[in-house]
Amino acid sequence: MLKSQQRKVFHMIKQLQTSRTVIQERDQVIRDAEEKNTEMRDQIEYFLEGQKPSSLPTKEWKPKPHCLQVTTPSSCLLTL
């Protein structure tokens, strides 16, 4: 009877150790993924900073209309 209980306890300890190892491995994968995500986000921000047009003023910029004065509907053709 004692041997049987000892085997059960040993088996439970082994399962616990295995579970801890699996959890540690998963935690490492998560940390690695978070680090890579941060690196990619930084690269995207850097890339987008380089894409901002420097010659345009801030939010006040508005596109100029192609035709300022319309006398007849056919005198100004809008191009998009």
Image: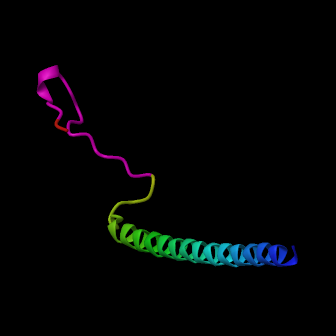
Answer with left or right where residue 76 lies relative to residue 35.
left
Answer with left or right where residue 77 lies relative to residue 57.
left
User: In terms of depth relative to the viewer, which is nearer, 25 or 69?
Assistant: 25
Chosen colour scheme? rainbow
Q: Residue furthest front?
A: 1
Residue 7, position as x, y percentages in the image: 77, 76
Can see residue 72?
no
Answer with left or right where residue 14 lies relative to residue 9.
left
Residue 70, position as x, y percentages in the image: 20, 27
Residue 65, position as x, y percentages in the image: 26, 40
Residue stretch rendered in magenta on the structure = 60-78
Q: Quadrant of the C terminus?
A: top left
- Predominant SS of the magenta segment: loop
User: In terms of depth relative to the viewer, which is nearer, 50 or 20?
Assistant: 20
Q: Residue furthest top?
A: 72
How many numbered marks have been drawn onto this rendered protein structure?
A: 0
Q: Residue furthest left?
A: 74
At 12% from the left and 26% from the top, the residue drawn is 75
Answer with left or right where residue 59 lies relative to residue 79.
right
Q: Quadrant of the N terminus?
A: bottom right
Q: Residue furthest right?
A: 2
User: In terms of depth relative to the viewer, which is nearer, 79 or 7?
Assistant: 7
At 84% from the left and 73% from the top, the residue drawn is 5
Residue 23, position as x, y percentages in the image: 64, 72
